Amino acid sequence: MAVREITYAEALREALREEMLRDDRVFLMGEDIGLIGGVFKVTQGLYEEFGRERVRDTPISETAIVGAAIGAAIAGMRPIAEIMYMDFLMCAGDQVINHLPKIRYMSGGKLKVPAVIRTQYGLYRYAAAQHSQFYPAFLMNIPGVYVEVPSTPYDAKGLLKSAIRDENPDIFIECAALYRLRGPVPAEEYTIPLGQADVKKEGSDVTVFAVSYMVHIALSAAKKLEGEGISIEVVDPRTLNPFDKKTLVESIKKTGRLVVIEPDHKTAGVGAEVIAIAMEEALDYLKAPAVRLAAEDIPPPFSPKAYNAFLPNEEKLISTVKTLVKSGKQLYK
């Protein structure tokens, strides 16, 4: 395959454009996505190419956006609705919880809701408490909705194309701090199966399960730890629903240690579920207790100094891994 270096935002735009060309049922809707190309410029140029019928600017109403997407999907269309900030997704909470994931189940499969809800979280941009929230574990707790959290341009494009073609409703969570990140993306057609994690780096001493932006922190930490003779394996879930238990368990079997690093809150977060899975399915392979590194249980602060202390970071990860490997603490004697 021919591979180019493009940004995360460009990879998303390519996925949207290619799927709109492939299937005329695919259309976009959301606040400011048309005339100005989206506040993050992901949809830039699509309005001019496909017109106002397929790239629709909407009122400032998350309830209307998600509700219209559900109706259009039931009617046979393939809507991709953008919620500008994840913070505002719960303004459409009734649709997200009671309708989007349940209609197919309650109709015995007669009705399908192949809608994609694209949204992003503003962590690492100092956007304060009402524009920075990331709550993937809440969505993991809603059966019937798929949840994607791509960390690279390659994953962003391949997962978005798969989500658009999926017969289930998908909530596709992007990270605004990654939009300008560049990475290799094939020019040829490709998709990534939903529910398939990716081992971003092989290792032998510790499994680091990293969610979204944390993948890059884990990879950077891994390079520094190699110089001290510590090898970490970085596992990127890519999708949280469906969840790839097999890759997680196989990695724990190999390394015997687990650290979860996530940008959501620690209490009842993604890490709690990941470690529960480890306890249920890989306890016999753990050499030491699993550890969670997550955001503090407070609203995201605006102050940069407080904000940096609020989030897990590379320094905390390196310190945690060293302690875990060198302490000699064992679950079993």
Image (spheres, helix red, strand yellow):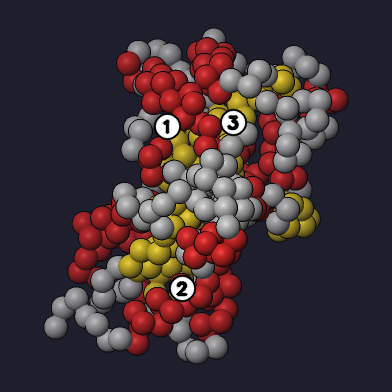
Q: Residues within 10 Å of mark 3 (few under 14, many from 20)?
A: many
- Amino acid tagged 3: Ile
Instruction: Indicate the quadrant containing the C terminus: top left, top right, bottom left or bottom right.
Output: bottom left
Name the side, left or right, on which 270 lies relative to 155: left
Q: Which of marks 1 and 2 is nearer the N terminus?
A: 1
The residue labelled by disc 2 is 316
Q: How many labels does the image show?
A: 3
Give the residue at mark 3: 83
Q: What's the residue at 76%, 39% (across, down)?
A: 41
Front label number (1 vs 2): 2
Residue 147 position, x and y percent, is 47, 39
Q: How busy is the neighbourhood of tag 2: few (under 14 within 10 Å), some, or many (20 plus)? A: few
Q: Position of residue 316 (x, y in %)?
A: 46, 73
Can you identify the residue that label 1 sits on? 145
Front-most of residues 147 and 199? 147
Give residue 206's mark.
none
Task: Look at the image and tell me whether residue 175 can be seen.
Answer: no
Quarter holding residue 181: bottom right
Q: Is residue 164 above or below residue 155?
A: above
Answer yes or no: is residue 145 visible. Answer: yes
Between the residue at mark 3 and the residue at mark 2, the CA separation in whole angstroms equals: 32 Å
